[in-house]
Image (spheres, rainbow, N blue to C red):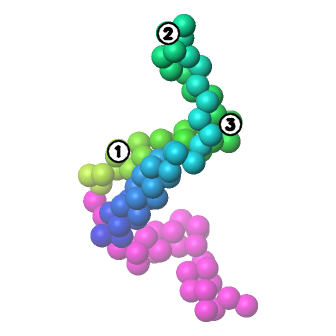
């Protein structure tokens, strides 16, 4: 359950980002007939798009994986030393 909702959340964020492409300042290279053949965009925007595309590919690849609960996720992270009890309960932070 947690895994799928996380996937949907990431997918929604990425789709929203892709739909906001109109915010990019589009510049094009055209051929002799005036047909657009290439796009020019700032490297930061290009890298953002590549990252979003990568994220979407991962979501698609993992679509059929079994889900785990948030509690199970925290337990796995604790077992692997990636989460301490203090990190998993922010109210315990000093």
Q: What element carries label 1?
A: helix
- Residue 68 can be seen in this image: no
- Residue 31 can be seen in this image: yes
Left or right, 94 with respect to 90, comes to right
| Residue 89 colored in magenta in the image | yes
Q: Is residue 90 above or below residue 78?
A: below
Q: Nearer the viewer, mark 1 or mark 3?
A: 3
Residue identifier under label 3: 42
- Magenta stretch bounds: 66-94
- Disc 2 versus disc 1: distance between alpha carbons? 40 Å
Q: Which of marks 1 and 3 is nearer the N terminus?
A: 3
Give residue 31's mark.
none
> Callout 2: 10 Å neighbours few (<14), some, many (20+)?
few
Q: Where is residue 17 in the image (x, y as percent from the top left)?
A: 50, 52
Q: What element carries label 2?
A: loop
- Disc 3 versus disc 2: distance between alpha carbons? 25 Å
Please give the name of the residue rendered at 62% of the width and 40% of the height, measured from the top-left corner.
Answer: 25
- Disc 1 versus disc 3: distance between alpha carbons? 29 Å
Left or right, 46 with respect to 11, comes to right
Q: Position of residue 94 (x, y in %)?
A: 73, 91
Please give the name of the residue rendered at 55% of the width and 41% of the height, measured from the top-left corner.
Answer: 49
Residue identifier under label 2: 33
> Callout 3: 10 Å neighbours few (<14), some, many (20+)?
few
């Amino acid at each position: 359950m947690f895994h799928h909702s996380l996937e949907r959340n990431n997918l929604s964020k990425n789709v929203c980002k892709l739909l906001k492409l109109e915010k990019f300042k589009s510049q094009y290279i055209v051929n002799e007939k005036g047909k657009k053949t290439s796009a020019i965009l700032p490297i930061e925007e290009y890298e953002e798009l590549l990252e979003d595309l990568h994220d979407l590919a991962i979501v698609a690849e993992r679509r059929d994986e079994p889900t785990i609960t948030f509690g199970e996720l925290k337990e796995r992270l604790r077992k692997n030393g990636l989460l301490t009890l203090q990190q998993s309960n922010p109210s315990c932070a000093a």
